[in-house]
Amino acid sequence: MPNAEPETIPTNPAAFAVPVVALRRPYLLFLGAITDPDDAKTAFGLRDWCRSACVGQFRLPGCTVSTGLPDMTPPFAVAAGARSLVIGVAPMGGALDPAWVPALVEALDAGLDLVSGMHTRLATHETLAAAARRSGRRIFDLRRADLPLDVGSGRRRTGRRLLTVGTDCALGKKYTALALAEALRHRGVRADFRATGQTGIMISGRGIAVDAVVADFIAGAAEALSPDAPAEHWDVIEGQGSILHPAYAGVSVGLLHGSQPDAFVVCHDPTRRTLSGMPEFAVPEIERIVALTIELGRVTNPAIRCVGVSLNTSAVSDAERAAFLAEYERRLGVPSFDPMRGGAGRVIDELLRSRDAAQA
């Protein structure tokens, strides 16, 4: 359920996780001057899943996107208790916008640490590094490519795993995984959310940003992130990208093979017509994504199966939402739900039924 505070769980050495538990909270969320809500998925994720750790948002002139949090300048946010400025924007390619630099320097000078999940390493930026030294503040770059990982082995691991996959990017794979992990725990099932992106790492306190991993080691990173576990334990692994996205399919397939999921939930926005950042490419049919996920997933887990559909219905009315949920449930023959509006329990029913049938 959104706004639930995640447990502060110590870093798992086997997963070479980034030690996010060292970050200073509360956060001020930086939105830059963005105009596309899809670019603010980091800020929205933090607002929705650790709301009490967010004091406000910092927007530059021209920004038309809002999290609904109070607008604050860095000095005002520090006075309100903020300790870190989090880059709440995830632009395509993860590059630093030069227009942000004066604002980020202002935040450091005001006494805020700087936390970034972008590909550009802010700690190596000359102006920002100088400001950090001057103010005695720290810069945390969460997307690390220097982790001591092995290539994927394909070895079958103990425990159970569920992966969220999608027809596109930025449509709810993280939210779905968080909701499913929470629903499993509410049933008394031992379960962990495994973060594979910067926002998930900030929320959960551990994880590996797999899109920063050298390509040969992506499957190995997924194996390290979900190591051997007790037979009844579930790792719920946050998916990335889409296996048919021209830019990000490599990450998605490596994550699928390394996760070797017993089950997956397919995430979809029924109102979206073209791929994120790729207006010339249509969103693929959900049935095609399910079929390809099963075909490719069988490389490391022949028993992989789809157990649910997660729909992002934020842009439609209640009546349209109900119609979409019924349609996709009929089309795929598995429970459908919107993770922001409940219903994950029906997917857990399907998940546990499939487990029991496999054991019979």
Image (cartoon, rainbow, N blue to C red):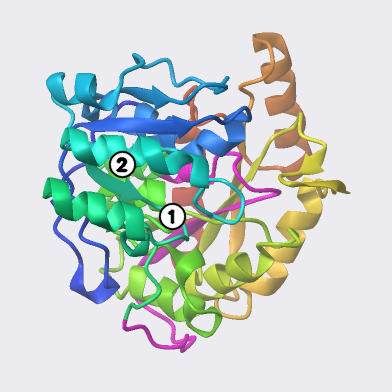
The amino acid sitting under disc 1 is: Gly
Q: Where, by quadrant of the figure, is residue 273 drawn?
A: top right
Near mark 2 (Cα within 10 A), the count class, few <14, some 14-19 or many ≥20, is many
Quadrant where the image shows the N terminus: top left
In the figure, is residue 282 to the left or right of 36?
right
Report the span colored magenta. 148-177
Percent of width and height locating residue 198: 40, 52
Element class at badge 2: helix
Percent of width and height locating residue 196: 43, 59
User: How far apart are the two marked residues, 2 and 1, measured between alpha carbons?
Assistant: 25 Å
Residue 1 visible at all: no
Percent of width and height locating residue 23: 18, 48
Percent of width and height locating residue 86: 33, 40
In the figure, is residue 5 to the left or right of 332?
left
Q: Is residue 151 magenta?
A: yes
Q: Residue at x 49, y 20 (%)?
A: 66
168 versus 328 height, above or below: below
Name the residue nearer the viewer: 171 or 80: 80
Determine which of the numbered discs, if any, sits on residue 160 in the image: none
Q: Residue at x 49, y 28 (%)?
A: 343
Disc nearest the viewer among 2 and 1: 2
Q: Residue at x 46, y 89 (%)?
A: 153
Q: Main secondary structure of the magenta part?
A: loop
Residue holding disc 2: 105
Q: Is residue 35 magenta?
A: no
216 versus 96 height, above or below: below
Element class at badge 1: loop
Residue holding disc 1: 197
The amino acid sitting under disc 2 is: Val
